[in-house]
Amino acid sequence: MLGCTVPTIGGLPEGFSWARKWGCECIQIYVTLSRRWDVSELSAEEVLQFKSAWRKSPVKKVVAHVPYLVNLASPDKNLWKKSKDRLRTELSRARQFGVNFLVLHPGSYGNSNREDGMKRIIEALSDISGEIDDQKTRILLETMAGQGTTIGSTFEEIARILEGVGNPGFFGICFDTAHVFAAGYDIRGYENYETVLKEFDAVLGLKRIKTIHVNDSRTNFGSHSDRHACIGEGNLGLEIFHAILKDSRFLNIPKILEIPERDKRSEDNLQLLRKLHVIPGRLPQSNKLQKQLIRKKTHVKQNTFSFR
Ligand SMILES: [Zn+2]
């Protein structure tokens, strides 16, 4: 299941028009204005319009992203409380819209320390998950690059948060390829991909992955710097994306592109990923051939792989 972050200028239902235009089977959106703390009331009419646009679209799953303002690890008591309240609002909206997953960056501990930051994340998530007893919308913790004082760049750290919050049915994980690579897990190439997934499986369990952010990385391996790139234009190579798209374990998992220049580049990046999806076996190792593939000079039919 493949899609991308879609623009919602003109209202959330607009996201589904972009999905149709770009051929997305899943989309990612913000369900509130992402740069503002104040959130307007949600009307029953808005919910109906959203659901009706979704029904008429090719989209099977909707992923919402929690705004970056939210920081559940913040040592600032006021900001921590505001963040928790906002997450509650995000979750409430996501549930009303019938959104499947709500992706959350665990948080940054700022001028405090990692341990205290972890405790604050666990406390906030435990409180919020304790208020809801169904699994209509799951909160997904995203794997992070580890920039600055960010928490969640190792699989162990995410495992500790999940153990701390309990309520396992309510939480899952969003695996971001660019972040994992920048965090120091080398996922370049088919063998490395398997090795990293094995490690993930041992620490967290692959079943916990509910969404994958398919992004290339502009920054280097282990840089802890979070800068996404278009597919094939960063340091990851095409093999990892080919492997993910072909991986039967992730067949029904939303795979979402989050690239720079989203409005201009989503369409061609999705086309490239769809091309990769139908290539059997392994990609040719030749850089030249891979570059041709990226430059759209290839024509790929089901079960054939011919360069023109
Ligand atoms: Zn991401």
Image (tube, rainbow, N blue to C red):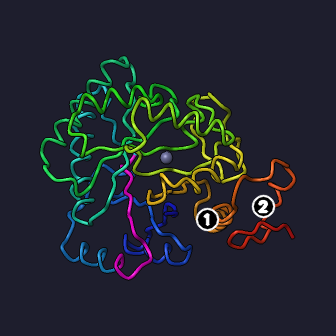
Dot 1 alpha-carbon crowd within 10 angstroms: few under 14, some 14 to 19, many 20 or more:
many
Extreme residue in the bottom direction: 56
Residue 194 lies in quadrant: top right
10 or 159: which is nearer to us?
159
Left or right of 289: which side holds 192?
left
Residue at the location (38% across, 63% down)? 62
Between circles 1 and 2, the one closer to the viewer is 2
Read off the magenta span: 53-67
Contact, CB < 8 Å: mark 1 with mark 2? Answer: no
Name the residue at 37% across, 74% down.
Answer: 13
> Disc 1 to disc 2, how far (Cα)?
13 Å
Identify the residue under disc 1. Answer: 270
Q: Position of residue 81 (x, y in %)?
A: 21, 36
Give SS at disc 2.
helix
Q: Residues within 10 Å of mark 2 (few under 14, many from 20)?
A: many
Q: Quadrant of residue 168?
A: top left
Mark 2 CB within 8 Å of ligand 1? no
Q: Is residue 278 magenta?
A: no
Under mark 1, the amino acid is Leu
Locate residue 96 relative to residue 11 in the image: left or right. left
Is 241 on the left-hand or right-hand side of 11?
A: right
Going from N to C along the chain, the mark reached first, 1 or 2, is 1
Hey, what amino acid is under mark 2? Leu
Q: Secondary structure at mark 1?
A: helix
Q: Nearer the viewer, residue 121 or 279?
A: 279
> In the displayed structure, would residue 4 be above or below residue 195?
below
The residue indicated by pointer 2 is: 293
- Residue 127 screen position, x and y as percent: 16, 37
- Quarter of the image that includes the C terminus: bottom right
In the image, is residue 17 above or below residue 69?
Answer: below
